[in-house]
Image (spheres, rainbow, N blue to C red):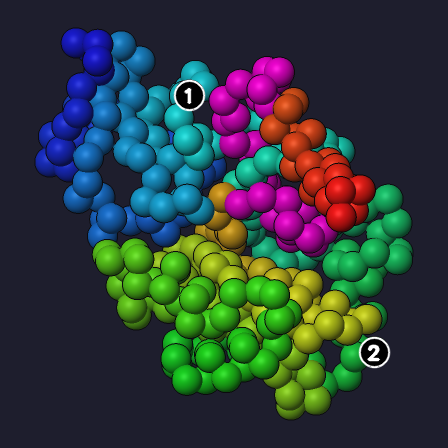
């Protein structure tokens, strides 16, 4: 390790951050950036100067303290300045993020980004109309209750997806420093029946979407729950709504997380990366065909 880049503890990091006038990387926030999670190992590079700490888990972005004009850090889950490119269909991880202002501003942004704002949801043109057509629709954010969560989540989830118990272990039990008072449930009711439920982490500055289960329906209850949570964030002065770092699952996150950013990818243009993508797409087909031939 270079003599100008060294490992420091939390107390050293606090002093250097104050002396150097460093701040958290612009427009990046995650609940793991709170003080409860800061008693860990930090890396300090005084040439830049930059202080960073490895992500708490695979879904957390890299925590970086810096000044403006931050160079690319070749570190796992580093959030770049590149906005999420929805036209790039290559599988990769993204930091799913929405900077919250007011709800109408969000809907207006969705209208601007949509090719068919009078048809697509949610937009300024469709939100109120579709909500009125649905009738008795209500969203509640409630304190976490394990039995309630297990019953409704496991009832709504797809058979191949993780159970509520497995999600809880990955999200809560494996994150020792997480204050349990931050755990909430977002529940979407239609005609007084729960149609979607989301495990939330609420640090009173941001809401983090940990995992969701919803009833399959033409109404798109999962998208409705996310939309109503944005409205909740706006009405309660939250700064952001995020889903951490994850892959391109489904096709709705780009409708919700309008400020999402690309994650640094090592050797993203290399031949090895090409082979990895090819294997993911075609290996199962080749194996299945070969098995049929020899059987």
Let me know if residue 266 is in the magenta part: yes
Name the N-terminal-most of marks 2 and 1: 1
Q: Where in the figure is residue 70, as x and y percent of width and height?
A: 42, 19
Q: Is residue 125 above or below residue 218?
A: above
Q: Secondary structure at mark 1?
A: loop
Let me know if residue 202 is in the magenta part: no
Q: Is residue 284 above or below residue 205?
A: above
Q: Nearer the viewer, mark 2 or mark 1?
A: 1
Crowd rating for badge 1 (residues with CA inside 10 Å; few <14, some 14–19, many 20+):
few
Q: Is residue 130 above or below residue 52?
A: below
How many numbered circles does the render carry? 2
Residue carrying label 1:
74
Q: Is residue 239 above or below residue 273?
A: below
Question: Is residue 178 shown left or right of residue 241?
Answer: left
Residue at image coords 52%, 26%: 265
Question: Is residue 286 shown left or right of residue 167?
Answer: right
Question: Is residue 64 shown left or right of residue 81?
Answer: left
Residue 48, can we see it? Answer: yes
Magenta extent: 246-273
Q: Where in the figure is residue 2, as x and y percent of width and height?
A: 21, 9
Residue 232, can we see it? Answer: no
Q: Where in the figure is residue 173, as x and y percent of width and height?
A: 30, 63
Q: Nearer the viewer, residue 215 or 163?
A: 163
Q: Quadrant of residue 282?
A: top right
Residue carrying label 2:
133
């Amino acid at each position: 390790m270079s003599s100008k880049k060294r490992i420091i503890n939390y107390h050293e990091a606090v002093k250097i951050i104050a002396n150097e006038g460093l701040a958290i990387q612009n427009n990046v926030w995650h609940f793991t950036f709170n003080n409860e999670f800061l008693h860990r190992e930090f890396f300090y590079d005084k040439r830049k100067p930059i202080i960073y700490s490895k992500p708490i888990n695979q879904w957390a972005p890299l925590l970086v303290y810096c000044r403006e004009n931050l160079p690319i850090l070749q570190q796992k889950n580093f959030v770049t300045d590149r906005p999420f490119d929805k036209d790039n269909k290559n599988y990769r991880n993204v930091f799913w993020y929405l900077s919250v202002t007011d709800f109408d501003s969000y809907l207006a942004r969705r209208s601007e980004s949509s090719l068919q704002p009078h048809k697509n949801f949610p937009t300024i043109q469709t939100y109120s109309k579709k909500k009125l057509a649905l009738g008795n629709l209500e969203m509640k954010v409630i304190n976490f209750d394990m039995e309630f969560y297990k019953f409704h989540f496991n009832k709504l989830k797809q058979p191949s997806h993780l159970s509520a118990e497995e999600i809880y272990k990955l999200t809560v039990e494996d994150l020792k420093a997480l204050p349990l008072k931050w755990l909430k449930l977002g529940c979407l009711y239609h005609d007084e029946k729960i149609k979607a439920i989301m495990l939330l982490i609420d640090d009173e500055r941001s809401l983090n979407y940990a995992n969701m289960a919803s009833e399959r329906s033409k109404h798109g209850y999962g998208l409705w729950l996310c939309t109503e949570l944005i409205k909740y964030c706006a009405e309660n002065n939250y700064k952001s709504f995020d889903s951490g770092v994850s892959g391109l699952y489904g096709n709705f996150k780009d409708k919700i997380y309008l400020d999402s950013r690309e994650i640094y990818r090592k050797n993203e243009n290399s031949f090895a990366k090409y082979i990895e993508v090819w294997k993911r797409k075609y290996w199962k087909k080749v194996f299945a065909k070969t098995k049929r031939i020899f059987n």
